[in-house]
């Protein structure tokens, strides 16, 4: 349907946009990620049910971009997202000693002083 308002540019449907579902089939759940402005990160805002990714984008636009400023959206099938189990929390523990990350963690000063001492002794 063409809008009477010239400022609105509606998406024109393709020739065949119908999706037939057989008995017992259901739509896929997609997770929606929203970006407020260019350069910002995408933030998870919710999920939609749709027959395919294109339809999910349209549903997500209508659901999550109507009232919020929006620069971009992503949709991803929920079953494509993988996470760690809470029982695997030991993966995220870090080492308590991280001296190797700091310059003070390297004991080079003692070696330099010992080398200088041997040089001065050899020059005598």
Image (spheres, rainbow, N blue to C red):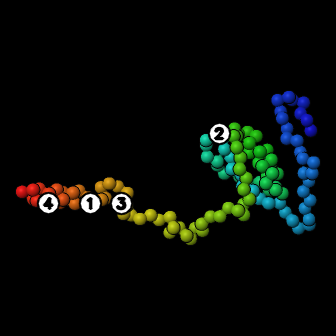
User: How far apart are the two marked residues, 1 and 2, measured between alpha carbons?
Assistant: 48 Å
Tag 2 or tag 1, which sits nearer the N-term? 2
Question: Are the residues tagged 3 and 2 within 8 Å (C-beta)?
Answer: no
Residue 18 seen in render: yes
Residue drawn at (89%, 33%) of the image: 3
**Residue displayed at 91% across by 53% down:** 18
Residue drawn at x 62%, y 64% is 83
Q: Who comes first in sequence, dot 1 or dot 3?
A: 3
Decide: marks 4, 3 in contact (CB < 8 A)?
Answer: no
Residue at left offset 91%, top offset 65%? 22
User: Which label belongs to residue 100?
Assistant: 3
Q: Residues within 10 Å of mark 1 (few under 14, many from 20)?
A: few
Q: Earlier in the sequence, mark 1 or mark 4?
A: 1
Q: Secondary structure at mark 2?
A: loop
Q: Nearer the viewer, mark 4 or mark 3?
A: 4
User: Is 39 left, or right, of 14 in this rendering?
Assistant: left
Label 3 Cα neighbours within 10 Å, binned few <14 / some 14-19 / many ≥20? few
Please name the residue that numbered disc 4 is placed on. Answer: 118
What distance separates the C-alpha of mark 1 from that of mark 3? 10 Å
Crowding at dot 2, Cα within 10 Å, few <14 / some 14-19 / many 20+, comes out as few
Separation of marks 4 and 2 at Cα, in angstroms: 62 Å
Q: CA distance from mark 1 to mark 4?
A: 18 Å
Q: Earlier in the sequence, mark 4 or mark 3?
A: 3
- From the viewer's perspective, tell me whether residue 108 is left or right of residue 75: left
Residue 68: image location, x then y, percent:
70, 39
Question: From this viewpoint, which residue is outermost toward the left?
Answer: 124
Marker disc for residue 37: 2
Mark on residue 107?
1
């Amino acid at each position: 349907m063409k809008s009477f308002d010239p400022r609105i540019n509606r998406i024109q449907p393709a020739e065949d946009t119908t999706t037939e579902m057989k008995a017992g089939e259901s739509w896929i759940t997609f997770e929606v990620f929203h970006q407020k402005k260019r350069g910002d990160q995408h933030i998870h805002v919710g999920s939609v049910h749709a027959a395919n990714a294109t339809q999910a984008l349209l549903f997500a636009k209508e659901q999550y971009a109507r009232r919020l400023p929006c620069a971009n959206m992503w949709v991803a099938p929920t079953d494509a997202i993988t996470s760690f189990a809470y029982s695997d929390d030991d993966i995220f523990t870090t080492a308590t000693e991280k001296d190797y990350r700091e310059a003070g963690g390297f004991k080079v000063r003692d070696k330099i002083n010992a080398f200088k001492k041997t040089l001065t002794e050899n020059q005598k």
